Amino acid sequence: MTATMKLVSSVRRLGCVLAFCFLALFLWGLPVARALDNGLAMTPTMGWLHWERFMCNVNCQEEPDSCVSEKLFLQIAEIMASDGWKDVGYEYLCIDDCWMAPERDSEGRLQADSKRFPGGIRRLANYVHSKGLKLGIYADVGNKTCAGFPGSFGYYDIDAETFADWGVDLLKFDGCYCDSIKHLADGYKHMSLALNRTGRSIVYSCEWPLYMWPIFKPNYTEIREYCNHWRNFADVYDSWQSIRSILDWTTSNQERIVPVAGPGGWNDPDMLVIGNFGLSRDQQITQMALWAIMAAPLLMSNDLRHISLEAKALLQDKDVIAINQDPLGKQGYRLRKVQ
Ligand code: GAL
């Protein structure tokens, strides 16, 4: 082969390699922005979260059955495993705010309130795991949680290690009491990396964009790189007005938020309140259908110990759940609004 032929053939080979690289980059970049690289939440998280139904009820003296306590979580775990919830996909049993003691321990570690959680979180996690379920916990990026318990600011690494050490599988990280937008962003990123460094698989549920919106428009591509799901809008309540306001917000911002959702990272319109008191039957069906279409995390907040057969059948509807859990992970758009 002459030198010229050799040169032509190498240029051709290089051309092929480059073309392949561009194609690979194109395909890689196609579906959605890059997700948090922890391999979790490839479909929207399913489970139960105490907040909307039980809020910050710490009065176990007078209301032993509905206060935020170990007893509540043990009972819900038992029911999730035995009443078909786990079988249809509800896997994460999540503690929200108000589980903590008012102070950290002498080594700066968070600790559970010892009266309400006498066995501590590690023992609770063991029990939850023995039922084939996973345990979620709650903390806050700022100086205090929204209900005033110790915040994680200045303790991100220690808290991530504590949660991993206890066997926690999901962290809901709230955004109260954060003094600047820079602290908010830095804190959410720091905790994401700290959780990854523990080596334990911990789903990371953020409220980062919710706290950013009043100041400026969140960068969802960046949020997706750090979080597995993120709350955008106000807390859900047990009323149709609340569900409507979430749907209105979601649809009026859909051009910005829908394209970013996909395997590994999801918009979180907050909990399912099906099975409580405020929604009619049709409104409950509507919440289930729309949360499925929105590829939303399906985190119920209700009392599984006392739930109607109708609500149970709706929440356990395998066809609707299959839409929510579609591996393609495309969030639906609103196409039309009928006045
Ligand atoms: C709110 C959060 C709620 C709940 C509550 C706890 O900010 O959006 O979902 O976690 O704090 O205090």
Image: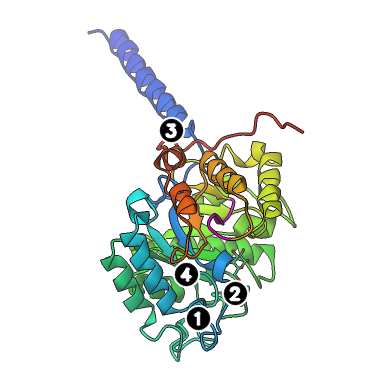
User: Which label number is shown at residue 71?
Assistant: none
Q: Is residue 290 above or below residue 97?
A: above
Q: Does the beta carbon of the residue at mark 2 sit less than 8 Å from ligand 1?
A: yes
Q: Tell me the SS state at disc 4.
A: loop
Where's the N terminus, which quadrant? Answer: top left
Q: Residue at x 46, y 84 (%)?
A: 116
Q: CA distance from mark 1 to mark 2?
A: 10 Å
Where's the C terminus, which quadrant? Answer: top right
Q: According to the image, label 2 marks what residue?
A: 145
Q: Is residue 316 above or below residue 304?
A: above
Which amino acid is tagged 2?
A: Thr
Q: Tell me the SS state at disc 2.
A: loop
Q: Residue furthest front?
A: 309
x, y percentage for residue 193?
45, 61
Q: In the rendered structure, which disc, 3 or 2, sits on the residue that comes first in sequence?
A: 3
Q: In the rendered structure, which disc, 1 or 2, sits on the residue that comes first in sequence?
A: 1
Tags 3 and 2 touching, CB below 8 Å: no
Q: Residues within 10 Å of mark 4 (few under 14, many from 20)?
A: many
x, y percentage for residue 223?
56, 51
Q: CA distance from mark 3 to mark 2?
A: 38 Å
